[in-house]
Image (cartoon, helix red, strand yellow):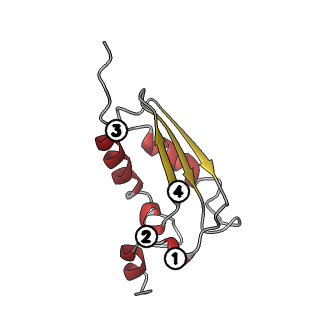
Amino acid sequence: MNKKIDLGKLQQDTIKVLKSIYDPEIPVDIWELGLIYELNFDEEGHLKVKMTLTSPACPVAGTLPPEVENKLSQIPEIKSVKVEIVWSPPWEKDMMSEVAKLELGFL
């Protein structure tokens, strides 16, 4: 019998990991930057992430999504991770959390 996954706890654990991943050009984690648009978990522990980058020309476009997949796949309850880069809506400063804005001097 499969143990039921606590999706609330899994989401908290996922966000905690996302807060440990930083855009190397901006000293703020990708969660607070607002780069994560969607986290979709299913009952079996498969995760689909929709995220964006600060711009299509972002120098970490080739390395940041695999880093996100790799780090999230280390959460024991997650069976698979698929990161999809989306450009709509385009990222803008208003998507940052107040924490990020404060850290970067926008507040």
User: Gap in Å between the C-alphas at discs 3 and 1?
Assistant: 28 Å
Q: First in sequence: mark 4 or mark 2?
A: 2
Dot in front, 3 or 2? 3
- Residue at horizontal 34 percent and vertical 32 percent from the top: 76
Depth check: give the residue in front, 82 or 8: 8
Q: Which residue appears at 32% of the width and 46% of the height?
A: 13
The Cα atoms of the two marked residues, 1 and 4, are separated by 13 Å
Looking at the rendered structure, the kind of residue marked 4 is Tyr
The secondary structure type at the circle numbered 4 is strand
Instruction: Look at the image and tell me in which quarter the N terminus lies.
Output: top left
Q: Amino acid at mark 3?
A: Leu
The residue that label 2 is drawn on is 28
Label 3 sits on a secondary structure element that is: helix
Which residue does the numbered mark 3 point to in the structure image?
A: 7
Say which amino acid is labelled 1. Asp
N-terminal-most mark, 3 or 2: 3
Q: Say left or right for 101 vs 13.
A: right
Precedes in sequence: disc 1 or disc 2: 2
